[in-house]
Image (spheres, grey):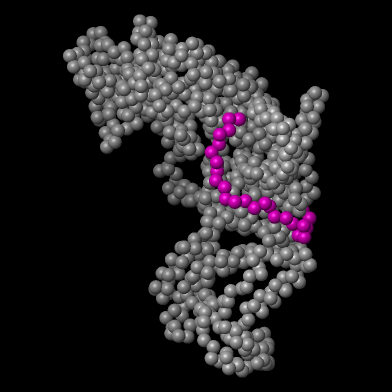
Amino acid sequence: MTSSACGYSTPERQAREEKKKALHSGPNHTAAPGSDQPWLWHVAYNFSGCLAHADITYRTSDRQILRITGILNHNQACQHARLVRRPAIPLHPQVYNIALKQLQDGASLQAVKITNQRLISSSSYAGLRDDPQFRNARYLILRTDSSRLYRALAHLKGIKTSQLPEVNIDRWLNPTSSAYQPLLHQAVLHYAPRTSKEGRFEACVVSKEMEEATWNYGHNSQIILDGTFGVCDSRLLLFIVMAVDDASHGVPLAFFLFSAPTGNRQTSAGYNSQILTLMLQKWKVWLEHNGRTFEPKVAITDTDTKERAALLAVFPALILLLCKFHLRQCWTNKRRTSLGSCEGSDYAKQQVKSRLQGLEISLIESTEHHQALGLVRTEHIHHTKLLQYSETKASSEAAVKYLDYLEGYWLSFSLWGSWSLAGRLRAAKAMNRAVEGVLPTTNHLESFNRVLKRGYIRQSEKGGKRLHFDVFFHYLISSIIPAIFEARHHEKNYAAWIGLRFGGSPFLSRSSTVEQSAATVVHPVAWIVNSSEPTTRQLEGYDIARHRRIFSMYYVDGHGTDLLEARCLSSKAIPFDPSPISYILRLHKDGFGSCTCPDFQYHSFHTGACKHLYGLLNHLALVRVAHPQTPIPLFSLPTDREDAVRLWGQHMPPTHPPDSLNPPVPSSQLLNTISTLADLIKLPGTGLIEEAELTDEEMREAESSIAGSGCEEVEAEVISEATSTRLHGTDRQGLQDQLHIQLNHTVQRLLPQLYHLELILKDFIPVRTTDLTELETLFARLHTSLNTQITLADQAVEPVDSLEVHVPSRRKLCEFLSGDLRPPSPETRQVRKKSYGVY
């Protein structure tokens, strides 16, 4: 049928389309809001009642025309019709193809339009140089073309945008469907559509490459488990299992995708240990189809008990480790809650904070449980003594509260074994590798989540709008996973080419570089770093002088006034401490200087003088101004490192043994020290600069710098046989300890509010609302759960925490019930919120 260009009746067409919809939808059809509004006219000519058209019949084999019939004459009004609207001019096929190719390669729509304009300017499109009077297509991409281009792109991938997302996925995975896609079906080992209001959408995705990586890097090794959300426009959670390859790169092993329950208030909390256990068990059973037993040795997670419970339910012999970053995040949140803000001039509070931070580092590096308990209890005694002083009472009470939190929650033997160095040593022994090969954090997976959401997914979004969940599902399997493993393949080939081309000799491994640098002997030397702006150490040195932390200055006997010695209080020193931490500083008139602090001993060769030496120089300058009548020689430090090394060779300062880094202060000088600290508390504006609030990424970097600084003497990384034996099989008990404390903490927080709710209900008859109905249902479930669990505890029966899952065959997914499919709940865009959890 070939129609004329004399238009059609838009109202008649609207009536016909509405009649079709009502006929196909049945008697219970409800019209969409606004559907009764008249359609806008889009045809180029107003309808004149002309019925002119031609019906042409032809043979498809040779396109031979067999018949022409129809109404071939236009009426009078049609013959005199004029163009009243801009006609719908099609886009030239070449423009369409180039734009689609760019979109397939990941280009943005703006980049597509820029390329289109450039090709028009250079007349690079076919037919663009022909007479424009006879063109029947346009070359410029308009704003109205974006939806057509994206629909065409989806069509190329087999995504039917006119179909509901849940129906699309069901048809792709159904071998009997006309839309069946074998590529997707082969990568999905478990699929369950959401067919009821209480049900979930479930899918477990493992490609062939991921299966191979699982056996290569996950079996008898370590895995990481963590989840993310906000990957599409529905309330879906994505959990990822990851391992680390020989090059210390993260490799995804499995993707678990499932919807949050109906009515869930927050997507990130829309899961429990049962759904994770189900997905992990499906994955494990599927991996073992060939008779092999998949058994990872170690798993690392954040502090989420649901992930840990699911892992132990599926892999009972697994060693569970806690991510050091998430652990420190919990401790930092609790410390800030206890101490409050450390801004301003509260010197005592700042010192307590610094001391507790040092304690946290020592606890993580502990290898014996009694050692960790001793560290906390020593600090507890110390701060308890300081409660008698009014100036330090508030900060000491906060410190004692925080120490009770550490000992009461984190220092049970079983839980301590999951986050301390002892746990990592145990994991290293189980995997038969060095402790450096045991992952301390989940950074690999956190980084992968960032690349996934900000790289791959954002690249596929159109106009910043979230992907429909069927589009995300398709892209994950057909584009994202292949791209990840293709990049790995190319990196491996590149490394092989480097070895083939250069033999590897010019490219030393990172470990050999570290060994060489460690073997290089450097000396602690004092020199001033030249820079346009003051360095951090120089600014901190000014604060040391301003806060009067320099004390006990005297000339060394036998050197006249050429050699000055002084002491500087450490930032970890506590007011009224009978043995405050301090460092010995020396300055010589010829420019030589030294300090016993760890920063100077280990870093000064590369970073210059420490903050304490800068503080002493500033202190001397202030004394000269305040006491001009006192003759004080002029001391300075060299500005060149070579000169500092030469001076070190001349003076050959004695090497301080570890015990002398913080020598005890003589009793004759203690009074001077204590009075100085008391004065500091009373001085206004003498607070040290508060450290900036760290982002997640900055905290990771800070932890890694602490771990690699070498500033502290760490005991040999050896765990005693007794501790190793006791830690065996304690992972399940550690989880139970964690859950027990969390339960008590939650009950303590809820009880006052529940009592308050009871008082309200006694004086008020509420109107039943959706929230009250949900609360009533929740109370009923809690009542049942409490009775069940308390009865089990009274009978000393272990709760059932494993879930038996029967998988009849390797690739049998589910029954396909397209008529009963339900979509996941929609979700608006959410932003990752800062964590304030302390457990």
- Residue 293 is situated, as x and y percent measured from the top left of the image, at 72, 40
- Residue 109 is situated, as x and y percent measured from the top left of the image, at 49, 63
Position above or below: 632 against 133: above
Residue at (58, 74) in percent of width and height: 40
Residue 263 in view here? yes
The foreground one among 365 and 546 is 546
Residue at (50, 15) in percent of width and height: 383
Q: Quadrant of residue 430?
A: top right
Residue at (24, 21) in percent of width and height: 621
Q: For residue 245: magenta?
A: no
Position above or below: 747 against 773: above
- Residue 692 is situated, as x and y percent measured from the top left of the image, at 43, 33
Q: Which residues are magenta?
A: 813-839
Would you say 606 lies left or right of 760 here?
A: left
Quarter placement of the C terminus: top right
- Residue 146 is situated, as x and y percent measured from the top left of the image, at 53, 66
- Most extreme residue toward the top, as rendered? 668
**Magenta: predominant secondary structure element?**
loop
Residue 656 in view here? no
Question: How many numbered marks are there?
Answer: 0
Residue at (62, 82) in percent of width and height: 8
The foreground one among 203 and 60 is 203
Quarter placement of the N terminus: bottom right
Position above or below: 349 against 93: above
The foreground one among 752 and 248 is 752
Would you say 82 lies left or right of 318 here?
A: left
Q: For residue 817: magenta?
A: yes
